[in-house]
Image (cartoon, grey):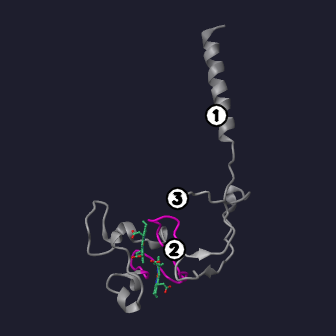
Amino acid sequence: MNRRYLVIIILSGGLLWSLSAGAVDLRSLRGDRPLDAGSKRPARADVILPENGEFKKSYRTHPPMIPHKVDKTRISLKKNQCLKCHGDLEHEEINAPMVSKTHFVNRKGERLGHVSTRYYFCTQCHAPQVDKTPLVQNVFDAGR
Ligand code: HEC
Ligand code: HEC
């Protein structure tokens, strides 16, 4: 057989194999809604509060989950209402836990006099909890 044909056969075999491997399980969190249909607004769910004041952590450095409502708390470029209660100057008066000391360190490892921009958008890491069936099963294992 001509070598060029052999190369084409091998390459197209590889292409078919990779296509079939790629088609394993492409489920989307959007369900079967077409991509151009816009996403559906999730149903409202009431925030649940922890029984003993805080939610159990899954591993040591887990960001604590928020044990109170935050639906009216705004974080924008100009103001961060979380810091009105959790800031280093404000927290004592409110009797709220202060943001972690780690939140004052920038990416160069320097300690700043204010919360670092890396930690400004609190809800990137801290989230309130709702009692809902998870959309996808969580198989995370903290290895303990
Ligand atoms: C009106 C004051 C207030 C505001 C605003 C507020 N918190 Fe809190 N937060 C508290 C208090 C007080 C606690 C202590 C637990 C409790 O009483 O619910 C707390 C607890 C927490 C905890 C748990 C800390 C731990 O060690 O377990 C986290 C995380 C948290 N808040 C994050 C946030 C984030 C993020 C925002 C903004 C989206 C926010 N909070 C806005 C008052 C506030
Ligand atoms: C990049 C992720 C991240 C962001 C963003 C973030 N945090 Fe945290 N936070 C953590 C982690 C992880 C911990 C626990 C470990 C530690 O102390 O660093 C924590 C701890 C805390 C605690 C508990 C402190 C204690 O002493 O127990 C509070 C309160 C808190 N954060 C509030 C906030 C607030 C308010 C903001 C926004 C200004 C914020 N965090 C932004 C990851 C984050």
Residue 65: say if magenta.
yes
Image point (37%, 66%), residue name: 118
> First in sequence: mark 2 or mark 3?
2
Label 1: few (<14), some (14–19) or many (≥20) C-alpha neighbours in 10 Å: few
- What amino acid is labelled 3 in the image? Arg
Residue positioned 35% across, 68% down in the render: 117
- Tell me which segment is drawn in magenta: 57-82
Please determine whether, in this image, residue 24 is positioned above or below residue 40: above
- The answer to whether 134 appears left or right of 140 in the picture is right
Along the polypeptide, which appears first: circle 3 or circle 1?
Answer: 1
Report whether 92 appears left or right of 144. left
Mark 1 is on which residue type?
Answer: Ser
The residue that appears at 69% across and 47% down in the rendered structure is 25
Disc 2 target residue: 65
Q: Please give the label number shown on residue 69.
A: none
Q: Which of 39 and 136 is in front in this view?
A: 136
Q: How far apart are marks 2 and 3 (CA)?
A: 20 Å
- Mark 3 vs mark 1, foreground winner is 3
The answer to if 30 sits in the magenta stretch is no
User: Mark 2: is the Cβ under 8 angstroms from ligand 1?
Assistant: yes
Identify the residue position indicated by label 1 in the image. 18
35 is higher (above) or lower (below) than 44: above
Gap between marks 2 and 1 measured at Cα: 41 Å
Q: Nearer the viewer, mark 2 or mark 1?
A: 2
Residue 144: mark in rendering: 3
Percent of width and height locating residue 106:
30, 65
Q: Which quarter of the picture shows residue 11?
A: top right
SS label for mark 3? loop
Residue 29: image x %, image y %? 66, 59
Looking at the magenta stretch, what is its main secondary structure? loop
